[in-house]
Amino acid sequence: MDPIILQSTLWIGGIGLVSAVALAIADKYLSVPEDPRIERVSSLLPGANCGGCGFAGCADYARAIIAKGADLNLCAPGGAVCSNAIASLLGRAAVALEKRTALVLCCGDDDEATRRAAYNGINDCAAAQATAGGDKGCSYGCLGYGSCARVCPANAITVRSGLAKVDKKRCIACGKCVTVCPRKIIRLAPAAATIHVLCSSKDKGPAVKKVCGTGCIGCRLCTKLADGAITMDGFLAVIDYSTPLTNEETVAVCPTHCIRKA
Amino acid sequence: MEYLLLIISAIFVNNFVLTRFLGICPFLGVSKKISTALGMSGAVIFVIAIASAVTWCLQKFLLEPLGLEKFLQTLSFILVIAALVQLIDIVMKRFAPPLHAALGIFLPLITTNCAVLGVAVLNMKEGYGFIKSVIFGTSAAVGFAFALLIFTGLREKIERADPPRCFRGVAISLVTAGLLSLAFMGFNGLVK
Amino acid sequence: MQAIPSPFTFHGGIHPFYNKELASGSPIRELPLPVRLAVPLSQHLGAPAKPLVKPGDSVKAGQLIAEQNGFISAPVHAPAGGKVAAIEETLTPSGRPCASVVIDTDGSQEWSLLPSFPNWQAAGKKDLLAQIGSAGVVGMGGAGFPTRIKLSPPVDKPIDTLILNGAECEPYLTADHRLMLEQAREIRIGAEIIRQILGARTLRIAIEDNKPDAIAAVEKAFQGIDGDVALTVLRTSYPQGSEKQQIYSVTGREVPSAGLPMDVGCVVENVSTAYAVCDAVLNGRPLVSRVVSVTGDAIRQPANLRVPCGSPYSDLVAACSGLKGKAAKVISGGPMMGFAVSTLSVPTGKTTSGLLLLSSAKISCYTSQACISCGRCVDACPMRLIPSELSQFIESGDVGGAEQLALMDCIECGSCAFVCPAHRPLVHHMRRGKAIVMAQLSAAKK
């Protein structure tokens, strides 16, 4: 063999060996131990980094599960599949997670609800609310400037004709829209529920009628047909989702059509 | 005086990123936040400075006496640089974990960063002595840091702006990098 | 006492058209007593007052109807005699609903007054402060900070300069101007009382140079006053009436970022507040009314009315012979820092200095565009902030970044929005950003 080839191989091999030894020594004395399970849990999570679990991204949630014993069922996009997989990895019992969806409790779009002034400012619901209480006639209804739609990580909310609506199929129930709505009229409800009272106005009947054609006027007709699932909060009908509501007559009997099937 | 010209040339006139177009990967990858960019800059300056010194010694005391420098230069340089960066990776993970987490994948990527190898090879090509090699290497890295920090500041501002849909993300950043490179062409002829 | 030119000028500021000639010639006259008053329980900074009356009760003018609720709060008194019809929520100019005591007035002239201090020079500081507090006197320049607290700075902040704010830098408004012309004597007494309470060595009355008649009237009223007293003639510029800017113009002292005037040994009080202090101490009358400028090009007869608090705006408009055509925009306050309202049933309060009714010719609906980094806002900002950067931070959701650029120092004067060529709603952004920061702070406290 050509001496140069042998020499080169030996020298490169030698440098490599020296480096390897140096690195091995450094690794032994300077390494930082990390629980390998964090990496594995992290790989089971969806990786959307939506923050719905309340932690700063999937990696942070994985760390919280291992280090701080966080609940396994906080990941809404991952759902039951994810929480079951993590549970079996860690040898813990699986916890059931009910699928939920966000719901905008208002059905007064620009055809039904009046606006009391022309708003000329930032295209944002909180900004509109801060300006003379918002331009909508009803002081409880959806302002329709789309702050919820912009914050939704799943693009599940559309704003049409001044009213926001959540697409049940896309919603991952992360709760960001609930936080951002300045009028606090978005709530998380079980995805299985189909009948909803889409109104949040606590005003008396005549006052509601003045500003919206489809708001709840507090007539109580629905409460009689709901077997206790609908109760009155002042002049507003409210559904208690822990009680199943299947009587579709509640939808038909509502005079202002604010109870809808969705 | 000669050293001053060398430094100015490495930092401004022949800026490694904007004029020689080496080291684009970390330039685009770590330029989202000033704090991360500062950390990366520090790491690169450190690596290049030491790499310049070590590769110079390797060339002078091993490769040249054995006559192997013509064909083993690239291979041995990469080997040494790789080991060096790995060592820095381990040290950083131990002593500065937040910075290590922030730099993420880009720290090991300094290994394959053409800027580091480029500095080492250029040193040999220009035939610099030991001191000059180290100074040239460090200045080149400072030039890299300079370009990186300017670009990060620009990117932070673009982050808050509202570019047209087709330009969002990396697209507008690349356009900006091109404009920045154009601006640095103004230094041409500063040092003969 | 002499009139001296202002030794300093603050940075930035703007020079809008003032249009003060619409109302500056109208002497103050009384508003015909409204049939119904909705007296807000929150006419001041701090917690709303707690009502002491209930529907059905009879009240006399000046009677205490709501007591102070907490340290930073102020009591509320009935502006006129009558019967309490209800305690319900009304809309305030800022858009937030507020509980109010609704009184059906009966026109009775009987007053329930506090004991007065005709010999106030001999009175102790504590008694005078208690009187001012019980009379519900608040800062009438617009903030509504309870005056009793303002005049009780902590011992480690000695006050050496009292500045009387007669600048009235907002366009259109002339309430303070007329007050200085017609009641300068009472303003002097109020100033002297405040100076005595604070133990301040220096008294400066600050008036803009676009009000030469007011300068003459005040000069005349303050003749013979003892001590280091002078009238500082300010260069007409907006926002000369903002206290931090005024302190700089008059004394050259800069209030530090996130600081207060007392940090530089100064207290600034509006001339209307001085008038209210005089009324409270000398006559025992609580603060229940104030001068409001009803002006603008959509009102038939612009006037300066003395209005009982809680009067609906519609009554003020009627007292000025109604509208000339349609009012496209109704602003509570001045055009720079006032709030646009959507209904005339909003009641006045202790801090309502003006009601502006503008026709469509005087307003514009703008479409805003992206910031072009021209820097005009930076030139204009009197607090030396960078409104372009701040608004971009807030618009992209990074309120923390905006906070680091001193967002909380913004006084919302509107100079930046006024000069912006891209018509960006800068003040709206600042208000939103500040609201988010305040919400975060209060959430963190819990």
Image (cartoon, coloured by chain):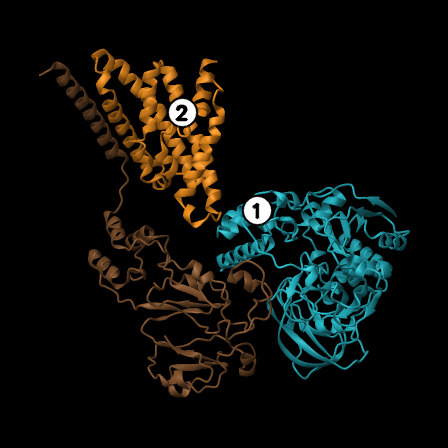
Q: Give the amino acid type for the residue marked by disc 2 in the picture.
A: Ala
In this image, C421 relative to C436: left or right?
A: right
The percent coordinates of residue B110 (x first, y second) are 32, 32
Question: Vertically, is A45 above or below B104?
Answer: below
Label 2 neighbourhood size at 10 Å, few (<14), some (14-19), many (20+)?
Answer: many
The percent coordinates of residue C265 (x first, y second) are 71, 47
In this image, A169 relative to C359: left or right?
A: left
Label 2: which residue? B140
Hue of chain B?
A: orange
The percent coordinates of residue B168 (x first, y second) are 42, 47
The percent coordinates of residue B29 (x first, y second) are 37, 39
Q: Residue at x 40, y 88 (%)?
A: A224
Count of labels in the image: 2
Hue of chain A?
A: brown
Q: Which chain is cyan?
A: C
Chain on which label 2 sits:
B
Q: Quadrant of residue C141?
A: bottom right
Task: Give the CA distance from mark 2 to mark 1.
Answer: 35 Å
Label 1: which residue? C388
Q: Are marks 2 and 1 in contact (CB under 8 Å)?
A: no
